[in-house]
Amino acid sequence: MDSREQLSHLISKHMLTLVASYTKLLDPGLTAPQYFILQSLAKQDMQTSSSFAAMLGVSLSAITNLTGKLVQKGYIERIASESDRRQVYMKITDSGRAVEEQMLARYKVLTEGVWDDFSDQELSLLIEAYQKMIGKLEQQNGSVKPHSQEE
């Protein structure tokens, strides 16, 4: 396995482990895509199903299913456009915002101490490398930038 393959494998393992731990911290019924939608709405409210379908690379019916569960939990609500009744926007509720904020707080606990053995130089290099990798992935996928921790 060459360095690029090894790095891709490690990043994939890191993401799966982190996402699995992260999304189960508060609500075992909240999936990673549902949390992504919640986090995106916390950052930028009033988004459409079409925008989420494009970001996640899934069908509109899959987004309807994902958002339906978030509506049932009271985390988001659907708002019909006043100008075009066919257009429906998603809006985070106070309850959804509270869950998202709790998830971010728990994420800090989850990652507490992870970076203690890294020097400032190593941390800077990691930050630069991740930013470069994410930028390249967004460019390749034409994706919209999701909510980051430090914007």
Image: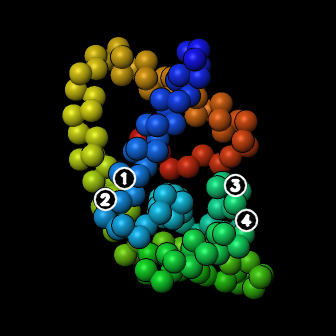
- Name the foreground residue: 89 vs 73: 73
**What residue lies at 66% left-to-right and 69% top-to-bottom?**
62
Residue 57, disc: 3
Which of the marked residues, 3 or 1, is nearer the chain's N terminus?
1
Q: CA distance from mark 2 to mark 1?
A: 6 Å
Give SS at disc 1.
helix
* Image-based side of 65 in relation to 28, left or right: right
Q: Residues within 10 Å of mark 4 (few under 14, many from 20)?
A: few
Contact between labelled residues 4 and 1, with CB atoms less than 8 Å apart: no
Determine which residue is flagged by label 1: 22
Q: Quadrant of residue 60?
A: bottom right
Give SS at disc 3.
loop
x and y, in percent, of residue 140 in the image:
73, 36
**What residue lies at 49% left-to-right and 75% top-to-bottom?**
70
Give the amino acid type for the residue marked by disc 2 in the picture.
Leu
Residue 59, disc: 4
Q: Quadrant of residue 37?
A: bottom right
Contact between labelled residues 3 and 2, with CB atoms less than 8 Å apart: no
